[in-house]
Amino acid sequence: MTTRLRFADAREAAGVAAFLGRLLRYDRAAAVRLQGAGGALAIFGKAPALDVVVVRTASAAAEGVGPLDVTVSAGELADAIDGATPAEDGGLDVPVPAAVTGPPWAGLLPPRTGWQPLTGLPEPDALRGAVAAGVKEFKAKVEALPEDKRTRSELDRIGADIWGRRLGGTELPLRAAHAAQVFGLLRGPAHLVAAGNWLRLRTPYGSIALRRTGGLPGLGVTPR
């Protein structure tokens, strides 16, 4: 029996499709890990160049299987959503694409439980302002470089300096807020939580998770 995702409505599915589209803009071969149970779905993706895991949540039930946990092609899932026809009750049934071999980051997801709140995080307007200032600074510093100095290593160095800065009185780096902005999550209230070696910027639309030290396999820091 084919596993299907039953989205609460077409708008909910469209939000997921938009998230997948943002991932695919950076990597046409992007994969996402799906975890679902009890009518809630979490879609995990890798934010290119920002060394974070992006988590998009949605109201969707997995049908034809117990708790869902599978890694699939982001492009195939986006196509499946685009090709689905809304049911009479407004819901949307989307077939889950065939599983693919997951990239290294997909095996290093943040924990599901044990999160504790942290203080010191700026308000969402301040977070968005900090992101805008960081983007402006990055562009200005790159434009100031002679053409022969605009190497990948130099761009990474500039990016690491800007996006590694801490937000407010927290350990959270600016790149986490940047990723939240890029992927359409930085709307409404935002909260910072921690579990073990993980930090998580949580919003009503999803979250950004990253390790306090080290990083995720195969990621850099140059914004795109």
Image (cartoon, rainbow, N blue to C red):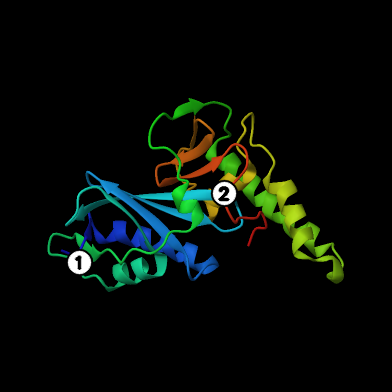
Vertical placement of 128 versus 111: above or below? below
| x, y percent for residue 5 | 24, 58
Task: Report helix, strand or loop for mark 1.
Answer: loop
> Does residue 77 appear in this view?
yes
Q: Amino acid at mark 1?
A: Pro
Vertical placement of 7 versus 198: above or below? below
Q: Which mark is residue 86?
A: 1
Task: Report helix, strand or loop for mark 2.
Answer: loop
Quarter of the picture containing the N terminus is bottom left
- Disc 2 designates what residue? 216
Q: Amino acid at mark 2?
A: Leu
Q: Residue at x 68, y 54 (%)?
A: 135
Crowd rating for badge 1 (residues with CA inside 10 Å; few <14, some 14–19, many 20+)? some
Q: Residue at x 63, y 41 (%)?
A: 173
Q: How many numbered marks appear? A: 2
| x, y percent for residue 13 | 30, 60
Drawn side of residue 107 relative to residue 95, left or right: right
Q: Residue at x 38, y 37 (%)?
A: 112
Drawn side of residue 4 relative to residue 32, left or right: left
Q: Residue at x 21, y 62 (%)?
A: 92
Quarter of the picture containing the C terminus is bottom right
1 or 2: mark nearer the eye = 2
In depth, the one of 206 and 187 nearer the eye is 206
| x, y percent for residue 216 | 57, 49
The image quarter containing residue 93 is bottom left
Q: Which mark is residue 107?
A: none
Dot 1 or dot 2: first in sequence order is 1
> Does residue 183 appear in this view?
no
The image quarter containing residue 9 is bottom left
Q: CA distance from mark 1 to mark 2?
A: 37 Å
